[in-house]
Amino acid sequence: MFDKLFAVCLLVDDFDKSLAFYRNTLGLMVNVHEDGFANFHLGETEFAIFQKDAAAAMFPATFMKPSGGVVVGFQVDNLDDSCKALTDKGVTFFEGPKTTDWGQKVAYLHDPDGNILEISEKMKSTDESYEGTIIEESLIDKSILQDIQITETHVEKVTPRHKTPWLKQWTLHRIRVSANQADTLAKKLSRALGKNHWYADYRTSSTHYIIFPDKIFRIDRSKPEQYEAAKKHGASLNIPEYQLDFDEATETTD
């Protein structure tokens, strides 16, 4: 039914103040500006602000809730430079700039109505695909496999070494993930994995995603010390030590 985000419109209390913030402070280019309404050039998706009093022409004001329940994301080429430029204009960031567990640089601020704005740095892309493994029995939501390229599957009979006596077998899927899908898939897998005992991973010659329930590690393979935090977290989920041996993963190729 829905295959495209058409528009995001924020209902604001003080239109002039919000217009000045988005146009002058953030530097967005105005496309349409009418009484109590403005939208901005942002690619294919329309971003707009609408004075609440004027928006009441669409639906009663009683349905308008206090601000702060939405996060609007913008992307930039260089987060540090953008944050410095906005700070010089008097903007205060309540979180960041920082690097997430999956390797993306982000920072957060409020607009005049208290809505949360995320500014993130575009992830560097590569033509190299990620290769890895997912154990089907580890997934609470197995439908996620429909969106993943599986290159090979084999089944292992469970033994005491597997430490999963409630299962009869492990179904191991070898997967291939394109660079531009790696981050999004990691987030989906983190939500789909069973809460204990499990992780999934995939890697290129330079980067290794290790994905636990609700926790993602994006590791620079040239820095083996980064694996220590992933091993510690895996141990806290009762994953056997031998399954957390990532030494082979640090052998980068030329």
Image (cartoon, rainbow, N blue to C red):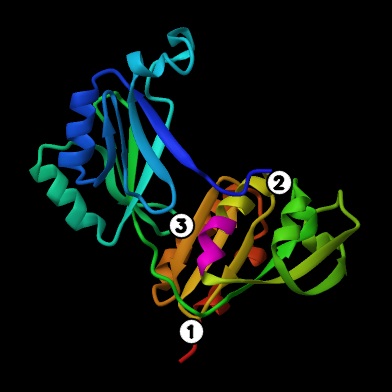
10 Å neighbourhood of mark 1: few (<14), some, or many (≥20)? few
Residue at x-position 18% and y-position 26%: 17
Callouts 2 and 1 close, C-beta under 8 Å:
no
Q: Which residue is mark 3?
A: 102
Mark in front: 3 vs 1: 3
Q: Is residue 143 above or below residue 64?
A: below
Image spot of residue 100 (x, y percent) = 40, 52
Amino acid type at circle 2 is Gly
Image spot of residue 136 (x, y percent) = 78, 58
Counting residues from the start of the chain, the first of labels 2 and 3 encountered is: 3
Residue 247 lies in what quarter of the image? bottom right
For the record, the magenta segment spans: 180-185
10 Å neighbourhood of mark 2: few (<14), some, or many (≥20)? some
Task: Tell me the tag on residue 194.
Answer: 2
Secondary structure under tag 1 reads loop
Q: Is residue 159 above or below residue 91?
A: below
Quarter of the figure that contains the N terminus = top right
In front of the other: 137 or 145: 145
Amino acid type at circle 3 is Trp
Q: Which residue is mark 1?
A: 252
